[in-house]
Image: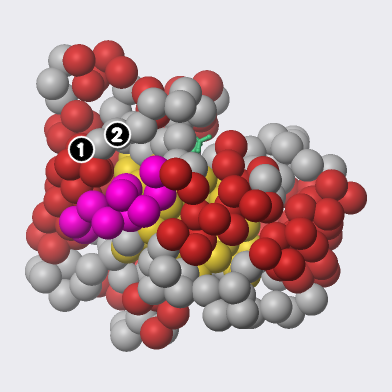
Amino acid sequence: MTPDPWRKAPLIAGNWKMHKTPAEARGLVRSLLGQLAAEPAAEVLLLPPFTALEAVVEELGGDTRVRVGAQNCHHEAAGAFTGEISAPMLAPLCDYVLVGHSERRHLMGESDNVVRRKLDAVLVAGLLPVLAVGETAAERSAGVTEAVVERQARAGLEGLAIGEIGRCTVAYEPVWAIGTGATATPDDAAAAAAVIHRVVAELSSGEVEVRVLYGGSVTPANAASLLSAPGVRGALVGGASLRADEFAGIVAAAG
Ligand code: PGA
Protein backbone atom coordinates (compact mmCIF):
# COMPACT_ATOMS: atom_id res chain seq x y z
CA MET A 1 0.00 0.00 0.00
CA THR A 2 1.42 3.39 -0.97
CA PRO A 3 0.83 5.85 1.85
CA ASP A 4 -1.07 9.01 0.96
CA PRO A 5 1.25 11.97 0.46
CA TRP A 6 0.09 13.61 3.70
CA ARG A 7 1.40 10.63 5.63
CA LYS A 8 4.91 11.68 4.75
CA ALA A 9 4.45 14.95 6.68
CA PRO A 10 5.22 15.07 10.39
CA LEU A 11 2.18 14.37 12.56
CA ILE A 12 1.39 16.64 15.50
CA ALA A 13 -1.32 15.04 17.62
CA GLY A 14 -3.10 16.66 20.56
CA ASN A 15 -4.30 14.21 23.21
CA TRP A 16 -6.90 16.09 25.22
CA LYS A 17 -7.31 13.21 27.69
CA MET A 18 -10.32 13.66 30.03
CA HIS A 19 -10.74 17.37 29.32
CA LYS A 20 -13.29 19.53 27.49
CA THR A 21 -17.06 19.41 27.29
CA PRO A 22 -18.48 19.61 23.76
CA ALA A 23 -18.95 23.38 24.15
CA GLU A 24 -15.40 23.86 25.44
CA ALA A 25 -14.10 21.67 22.65
CA ARG A 26 -15.79 23.87 20.07
CA GLY A 27 -14.12 26.93 21.56
CA LEU A 28 -10.69 25.31 21.50
CA VAL A 29 -11.14 24.21 17.87
CA ARG A 30 -12.23 27.71 16.86
CA SER A 31 -9.21 29.35 18.40
CA LEU A 32 -6.87 26.70 17.04
CA LEU A 33 -8.17 27.18 13.50
CA GLY A 34 -7.53 30.90 13.89
CA GLN A 35 -3.91 30.28 14.82
CA LEU A 36 -2.84 27.53 12.44
CA ALA A 37 -0.99 28.53 9.29
CA ALA A 38 -3.03 28.40 6.07
CA GLU A 39 -1.02 25.35 5.02
CA PRO A 40 0.70 23.82 8.04
CA ALA A 41 3.79 21.77 7.20
CA ALA A 42 2.55 19.10 9.59
CA GLU A 43 -0.52 16.93 9.62
CA VAL A 44 -2.52 18.06 12.66
CA LEU A 45 -4.58 15.57 14.66
CA LEU A 46 -6.95 16.22 17.55
CA LEU A 47 -7.85 13.44 19.98
CA PRO A 48 -10.79 14.74 22.01
CA PRO A 49 -12.78 12.64 24.50
CA PHE A 50 -15.51 10.50 22.88
CA THR A 51 -18.23 12.88 24.03
CA ALA A 52 -16.68 15.81 22.14
CA LEU A 53 -15.81 14.00 18.91
CA GLU A 54 -18.93 15.03 17.07
CA ALA A 55 -18.68 18.64 18.24
CA VAL A 56 -15.05 18.82 17.08
CA VAL A 57 -15.90 17.37 13.66
CA GLU A 58 -18.77 19.83 13.27
CA GLU A 59 -16.70 22.79 14.38
CA LEU A 60 -13.93 21.88 11.92
CA GLY A 61 -16.53 22.09 9.19
CA GLY A 62 -14.43 20.06 6.76
CA ASP A 63 -11.25 22.11 7.31
CA THR A 64 -8.65 19.78 5.82
CA ARG A 65 -5.83 21.12 8.00
CA VAL A 66 -7.01 19.09 10.99
CA ARG A 67 -7.88 15.43 11.40
CA VAL A 68 -9.70 13.82 14.26
CA GLY A 69 -9.09 10.68 16.27
CA ALA A 70 -10.19 8.91 19.43
CA GLN A 71 -8.07 8.19 22.50
CA ASN A 72 -9.08 4.56 22.93
CA CYS A 73 -11.57 1.91 21.83
CA HIS A 74 -12.74 -1.53 22.87
CA HIS A 75 -11.31 -4.53 21.05
CA GLU A 76 -14.67 -6.07 20.24
CA ALA A 77 -16.85 -4.60 17.50
CA ALA A 78 -20.07 -4.78 19.52
CA GLY A 79 -21.59 -6.58 22.47
CA ALA A 80 -22.39 -6.53 26.17
CA PHE A 81 -19.52 -4.28 27.28
CA THR A 82 -21.20 -1.59 29.35
CA GLY A 83 -19.54 1.78 29.03
CA GLU A 84 -17.27 0.85 26.15
CA ILE A 85 -16.98 2.30 22.63
CA SER A 86 -15.97 0.18 19.63
CA ALA A 87 -13.90 1.01 16.57
CA PRO A 88 -16.83 0.67 14.14
CA MET A 89 -18.74 3.18 16.30
CA LEU A 90 -15.85 5.62 15.88
CA ALA A 91 -15.35 5.07 12.16
CA PRO A 92 -18.02 7.58 11.03
CA LEU A 93 -16.49 10.27 13.25
CA CYS A 94 -12.74 10.02 12.90
CA ASP A 95 -9.67 8.73 11.08
CA TYR A 96 -7.31 7.70 13.88
CA VAL A 97 -7.47 5.83 17.19
CA LEU A 98 -4.74 5.96 19.85
CA VAL A 99 -4.04 2.59 21.48
CA GLY A 100 -1.69 1.67 24.29
CA HIS A 101 -1.31 5.08 25.89
CA SER A 102 0.61 4.62 29.13
CA GLU A 103 -2.34 5.88 31.17
CA ARG A 104 -4.35 2.99 29.75
CA ARG A 105 -1.53 0.50 30.21
CA HIS A 106 -0.70 1.53 33.76
CA LEU A 107 -3.88 3.06 35.23
CA MET A 108 -6.37 0.79 33.47
CA GLY A 109 -4.18 -2.32 33.44
CA GLU A 110 -4.09 -2.88 29.68
CA SER A 111 -1.59 -5.56 28.73
CA ASP A 112 0.39 -5.78 25.49
CA ASN A 113 -2.14 -8.40 24.43
CA VAL A 114 -5.16 -6.14 25.01
CA VAL A 115 -3.43 -3.25 23.26
CA ARG A 116 -2.79 -5.51 20.29
CA ARG A 117 -6.42 -6.60 20.13
CA LYS A 118 -7.45 -2.95 20.08
CA LEU A 119 -4.98 -2.17 17.31
CA ASP A 120 -6.38 -5.05 15.27
CA ALA A 121 -9.93 -3.73 15.83
CA VAL A 122 -8.87 -0.28 14.65
CA LEU A 123 -7.41 -1.71 11.45
CA VAL A 124 -10.46 -3.89 10.80
CA ALA A 125 -12.67 -0.79 11.13
CA GLY A 126 -10.61 0.93 8.44
CA LEU A 127 -9.09 3.42 10.87
CA LEU A 128 -5.45 4.35 11.46
CA PRO A 129 -3.86 3.23 14.74
CA VAL A 130 -1.40 5.29 16.75
CA LEU A 131 0.38 2.78 18.98
CA ALA A 132 1.95 4.33 22.09
CA VAL A 133 4.96 2.66 23.69
CA GLY A 134 7.41 3.71 26.37
CA GLU A 135 9.24 2.75 29.53
CA THR A 136 8.47 3.67 33.12
CA ALA A 137 10.95 5.49 35.37
CA ALA A 138 11.79 2.18 37.07
CA GLU A 139 12.43 0.48 33.74
CA ARG A 140 14.63 3.37 32.68
CA SER A 141 16.66 3.15 35.91
CA ALA A 142 17.00 -0.58 35.38
CA GLY A 143 18.51 0.10 31.94
CA VAL A 144 15.79 -1.77 30.03
CA THR A 145 14.32 1.14 28.05
CA GLU A 146 15.16 -0.28 24.64
CA ALA A 147 13.99 -3.76 25.60
CA VAL A 148 10.61 -2.40 26.76
CA VAL A 149 10.15 -0.29 23.63
CA GLU A 150 11.06 -3.25 21.46
CA ARG A 151 8.71 -5.61 23.33
CA GLN A 152 5.76 -3.21 23.09
CA ALA A 153 6.39 -2.37 19.43
CA ARG A 154 6.74 -6.03 18.52
CA ALA A 155 3.62 -7.03 20.47
CA GLY A 156 1.72 -4.29 18.67
CA LEU A 157 2.87 -5.04 15.13
CA GLU A 158 4.11 -8.61 14.81
CA GLY A 159 2.11 -10.74 12.38
CA LEU A 160 0.38 -7.82 10.67
CA ALA A 161 0.35 -7.71 6.89
CA ILE A 162 2.88 -5.27 5.47
CA GLY A 163 0.10 -2.93 4.31
CA GLU A 164 -1.36 -2.93 7.82
CA ILE A 165 1.99 -2.01 9.37
CA GLY A 166 2.14 0.85 6.87
CA ARG A 167 -1.10 2.23 8.27
CA CYS A 168 0.30 2.47 11.79
CA THR A 169 2.01 5.34 13.57
CA VAL A 170 4.07 4.61 16.70
CA ALA A 171 4.44 7.15 19.49
CA TYR A 172 7.39 6.82 21.84
CA GLU A 173 6.30 8.26 25.16
CA PRO A 174 8.58 7.67 28.13
CA VAL A 175 6.11 7.33 31.02
CA TRP A 176 8.26 9.42 33.35
CA ALA A 177 8.06 12.35 30.91
CA ILE A 178 4.27 12.44 30.58
CA GLY A 179 2.71 15.42 32.31
CA THR A 180 5.80 15.93 34.45
CA GLY A 181 7.68 18.70 32.67
CA ALA A 182 10.61 16.30 32.29
CA THR A 183 11.45 15.46 28.69
CA ALA A 184 13.65 12.89 27.10
CA THR A 185 16.66 14.35 25.35
CA PRO A 186 16.61 14.32 21.54
CA ASP A 187 19.23 11.56 21.81
CA ASP A 188 16.92 9.45 24.01
CA ALA A 189 14.07 9.99 21.53
CA ALA A 190 16.33 9.09 18.61
CA ALA A 191 17.51 5.91 20.34
CA ALA A 192 13.94 4.75 20.98
CA ALA A 193 12.90 5.72 17.45
CA ALA A 194 15.77 3.64 16.08
CA VAL A 195 14.50 0.61 17.97
CA ILE A 196 11.00 1.10 16.55
CA HIS A 197 12.28 1.59 13.00
CA ARG A 198 14.40 -1.55 13.35
CA VAL A 199 11.39 -3.60 14.51
CA VAL A 200 9.25 -2.25 11.66
CA ALA A 201 11.96 -2.96 9.09
CA GLU A 202 12.31 -6.50 10.39
CA LEU A 203 8.57 -7.21 10.51
CA SER A 204 7.94 -5.75 7.07
CA SER A 205 11.11 -7.10 5.41
CA GLY A 206 12.13 -3.49 4.88
CA GLU A 207 9.01 -2.75 2.81
CA VAL A 208 7.49 0.03 4.90
CA GLU A 209 8.41 2.76 7.32
CA VAL A 210 6.12 4.20 9.95
CA ARG A 211 6.07 7.64 11.45
CA VAL A 212 7.52 7.65 14.95
CA LEU A 213 6.28 10.43 17.23
CA TYR A 214 7.82 11.63 20.49
CA GLY A 215 5.51 12.38 23.40
CA GLY A 216 6.09 13.59 26.96
CA SER A 217 5.98 17.23 28.08
CA VAL A 218 6.34 18.64 24.56
CA THR A 219 6.02 22.45 24.55
CA PRO A 220 6.56 25.17 21.94
CA ALA A 221 9.97 25.77 23.57
CA ASN A 222 11.31 22.22 23.24
CA ALA A 223 9.38 21.02 20.17
CA ALA A 224 11.89 22.02 17.51
CA SER A 225 14.78 20.16 19.12
CA LEU A 226 12.72 17.02 19.85
CA LEU A 227 11.23 17.04 16.35
CA SER A 228 14.67 17.24 14.82
CA ALA A 229 15.83 14.06 16.57
CA PRO A 230 16.78 11.52 13.91
CA GLY A 231 13.94 9.10 13.23
CA VAL A 232 11.30 11.26 14.96
CA ARG A 233 8.53 12.46 12.69
CA GLY A 234 6.07 14.26 14.90
CA ALA A 235 4.80 14.68 18.45
CA LEU A 236 2.03 13.44 20.70
CA VAL A 237 1.14 16.39 22.89
CA GLY A 238 -0.93 16.27 26.08
CA GLY A 239 -1.07 19.32 28.33
CA ALA A 240 0.07 21.83 25.72
CA SER A 241 -2.65 20.68 23.31
CA LEU A 242 -5.29 22.16 25.61
CA ARG A 243 -4.09 25.68 24.76
CA ALA A 244 -4.58 26.78 21.17
CA ASP A 245 -1.57 29.09 21.18
CA GLU A 246 0.78 26.44 22.55
CA PHE A 247 -0.48 23.69 20.27
CA ALA A 248 -0.31 25.97 17.22
CA GLY A 249 3.24 26.88 18.29
CA ILE A 250 4.21 23.20 18.33
CA VAL A 251 2.65 22.70 14.89
CA ALA A 252 4.64 25.69 13.61
CA ALA A 253 7.84 24.22 15.09
CA ALA A 254 7.32 21.13 12.93
CA GLY A 255 7.48 23.20 9.75
P1 PGA B 1 2.05 15.61 28.12
O1 PGA B 1 1.23 14.28 27.70
O2 PGA B 1 2.37 16.34 26.85
O3 PGA B 1 1.09 16.36 29.00
O4 PGA B 1 3.26 15.15 28.84
C1 PGA B 1 1.62 13.52 26.58
C2 PGA B 1 0.68 12.35 26.43
O5 PGA B 1 0.28 11.77 27.44
O6 PGA B 1 0.32 11.95 25.30
Q: Residue placed at 39% from the left, 43% from the top?
A: 222
Determine which quarter of the picture holds residue 55: bottom right
Q: Nearer the viewer, residue 188 or 152?
A: 188
**Dominant SS in magenta:** helix
Residue that badge 1 annotates: 188
Q: Nearer the viewer, residue 74 or 224?
A: 224
- The relative height of residue 4 versus residue 131 in the rendered view (above or below) is below
Residue that badge 2 annotates: 184
The three-letter code of the residue at mark 2 reads Ala
The C terminus, quarter of image = bottom left
Residue contact between numbered discs 1 and 2, judged by CB atoms under 8 Å:
yes
The three-letter code of the residue at mark 1 reads Asp
- The relative height of residue 140 versus residue 147 in the rendered view (above or below) is above
Work out whether residue 83 can be spotted. Answer: yes
* First to last magenta residue range: 222-231
The N terminus, quarter of image = bottom left
In the image, the residue with mark 1 has its CB under 8 Å from the nearest atom of ligand 1: no
* Left-right relation of 202 to 141: left
